[in-house]
Image (cartoon, helix red, strand yellow):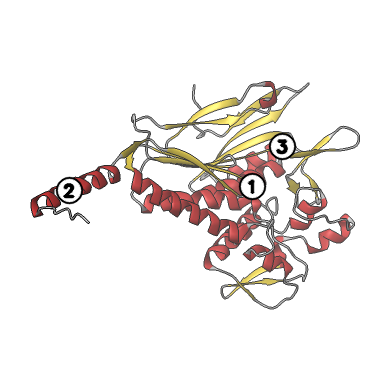
Amino acid sequence: MKLIHTSPFRFALLLVVLLLVWFGRSVQKVSNPSWEQPTMGTLCHITISGSISKNELSALREKVDAELETVNQRMSTWQSDTEISQFNAFQSSEPFSVSPEFLTVVRRALNIAEITDGAFDPTVKPLVDHWGFGPEVDTEPLAEIMKAVGWQKVRIEEGALMKMHSTVQLDLSAIAKGYGVDAVADVLRRNGILGFIVEIGGEIVANGLKSNGQPWRVGVESPNAAQGADIFQALELLGGAMATSGDYRNFRIREDGSRFSHLIDPTTGRPAETDIASVSVLANSCMDADAIATALFVMGSEKSFQWLENYSEFEAFFILHSTKGTFTTRITDGFPLEP
């Protein structure tokens, strides 16, 4: 067998070359990366402005994915082992311990239910199931179902949740996507990302500017998207959050050909029927924007504008049903529409 002797100089040179190759690969930059990943029955879209190394981007994506999985594990009613599903299955008035994060969302959901007079209500899961929009089928009479609906039937006591009615069930889908967007945005900020936009199912958080120094540009989806008119109104989002609730994405058709949306009026137990086709809300947090958009849709435009006069921290853009399939708009003074 022939032995090959390598001089110390050659060995050192080889080591330097290998280190340079490794270092070069590790600092390769990606400009304005954008990606999507499944979550909550839809997709999370993320775009970052500027450059980031491939290694940093890979680590960041893993952190975002882990955060989304955590949110889903707490808030999804479509899995039996999640925190919310375990609470829903718990038929007792005894305190039910939950994570601090889950408690934060429920606390804010109950608060928004109170200030909107129940137009937003996190206890609507039996109604969501009854009308065919949930993971289960509930064929009980509506009057019977309504006995377990009402945000006052859930209380928070010393960091735990308590049911005032044994069969109360939570559905946080009208606030959880917004919370998920906020959670992803927090991950990005903690990792030093200052310019980004995050979107889950139409709920958005924007931070900083694009790499060209321009604001992030977003659009409100058109009710006539099926006819090819995708964007009804564009706007520049200089920061903060926006969420939209509408009746033209998720709906069912009755036997008579009429349709009803997934947005339930908790006071009647029936799908909300208002003059609103969609409402987009601007707020400091996407969790708030998500829930308030749902509440405003249920209220209808006239009551919504009366409510907004008392809550100036929210701005809103309404697309309203008009005659013969046409639409009109109504906006609050501070909603930043593009000319």
Name the image quarter holding the N terminus.
bottom left
Residue position marked by numbered label 3 in the rendering:
247
Inter-mark Cα distance, 1 to 2: 50 Å
Marker disc for residue 14:
2
- Closest to the observer, 17 or 328: 17
Position of residue 50 in the picture relative to residue 13 (left or right): right
Mark 3 or 2, which is nearer the eye?
A: 2
Residue position marked by numbered label 1 in the rendering:
41
Discs 3, 2 touching: Cβ within 8 Å = no
Position of residue 65 in the picture relative to residue 232 (left or right): left
Position of residue 230 in the picture relative to residue 149 (left or right): left
Q: Residue at x 74, y 25 (%)?
A: 322
In the figure, 235 relative to 201: above or below? above
Q: Residue 33: where, in percent of width, then height?
A: 40, 37
Q: Earlier in the sequence, mark 1 or mark 3?
A: 1
Q: Residue 245: where, in percent of width, then height?
A: 65, 40
The three-letter code of the residue at mark 1 reads Gly
Residue extending furthest toward the bottom: 94
Inter-mark Cα distance, 3 to 2: 65 Å
Q: Residue at x 82, y 55 (%)?
A: 137
Q: Give the crowd class for mark 2: few <14, some 14-19, many >=20 residues within 10 Å.
A: few
The three-letter code of the residue at mark 2 reads Leu
Specify the quadrant of the image occupied by residue 277: top right
Mark 1 or 2, which is nearer the eye?
A: 2
Tell me the SS state at disc 3.
loop
